[in-house]
Image (spheres, rainbow, N blue to C red):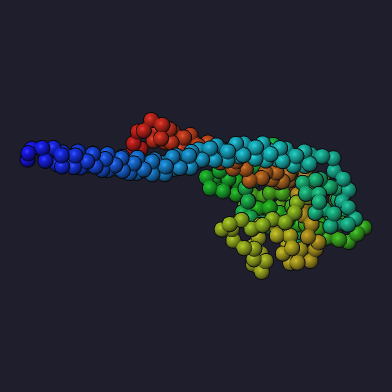
Amino acid sequence: MFKNLCKIYLIPQYANYSKKLIRNSLKFHSTVTNALKYQKAKKKAPIEIYKWFLFGLPVSAFGLGSWQVYRLQWKLGLIDTLQAKTNSRPVDIPRDLSELEKMEYMPVKVRGKFLHDKEILIGPRALIEPETGIARVGSLVSDPKKNQGWLVVTPFMLADRGEVILVNRGWIHQNLRSKEKREASLIKDEVELVGVVRLTEHRAPFMPKNNPAKGSWFYRDLDQMSEHIGCSPVWLDARGIPDPPEGWPLPNQTRVTLRNEHFSYIVTWYSLSVLTAIMWHRYFIRKLPLL
């Protein structure tokens, strides 16, 4: 009878308990599995975000490199335009000298007399080769005895107008800095010349400031020079024969160059693009550790 009672009461309860235990066990395993999946998904999500965020580095660097290619072509075209201006046909200097502000690098014709008593020297400066329009290589460092010199800037009184402008007559070697050594070049008669219009020049970093009181001039500050001399803020780079008589300033000292560092920028950005692309592929695609 006891056995019968166990069959009636205990076995169904045990069966119910087993079902409940199995159900709870399955529920626990399901919860643990879902938690692990969540943690795995949670861990994977930031990696995917970082992956595509870092992919923007090589893409952006490549875009900047391509932009510098465009800038290089634009800068070279601008330099060619300025070269064409300097080689254009000379025109008479306008009656209104303020119009020259729109005529930089254009040659103009003037007639008048030099005022040698108010001459100033700018420098030291390197000799600019007339064929290339750039300073001779190694001028101020490696070969100062040969290429270091000064620009002779002389006030020029325009005929029939009385206005005075500044004319850069050209480059002289440092040995000719004294006027006595180039007496023959100090022309006193009325002359006609062609000069290239130049505007004012900003002081370069680390360049000393002009000191008019001491006669020290390092850069072309037209407002400062015109105030010191008492003339119009107009500057012409004189043209002339490339081989003047000995002791005369060497004309054609117009530097037709613009700051052009775009090629180095191209190399930098494209190199950065390739390097970051390789690193991105190695870490996110091939799953290799970065060194």
Residue 270 pos. (x, y %): 53, 36
Image height check: is 289 above or below 125?
above
Residue 243 pos. (x, y %): 72, 40
Which residue is at the far right?
Answer: 160
Q: Residue at x 67, y 50 (%)?
A: 172
Residue 160 pos. (x, y %): 92, 58
- The answer to whether residue 106 is visible is yes
- Number of dots carrying numbers: 0
User: Where on the picture, by quarter, is residue 43?
Assistant: top left
Image height check: is 205 above or below 256?
below
- The answer to whether residue 247 is visible is no
Q: Quadrant of the N terminus?
A: top left
User: Where on the picture, by quarter, is residue 240?
Assistant: top right
Residue 256 left/right relative to 272:
right
Residue 46 left/right relative to 228:
left
Q: Quadrant of the C terminus?
A: top left
Residue 273 pos. (x, y %): 50, 37
Q: Of residues 170 and 74, which is closer to you in this image?
A: 74
User: Where on the picture, by quarter, is residue 17?
Assistant: top left
Q: Of residues 86 and 274, which is closer to you in this image?
A: 274
Which residue is at the far bottom?
Answer: 213
Residue 281 left/right relative to 225:
left
Q: Residue at x 72, y 41 (%)?
A: 78
Q: Residue at x 78, y 41 (%)?
A: 85
Image height check: is 77 above or below 250?
above
Which residue is at the far left?
Answer: 2
Image height check: is 220 above or below 283?
below
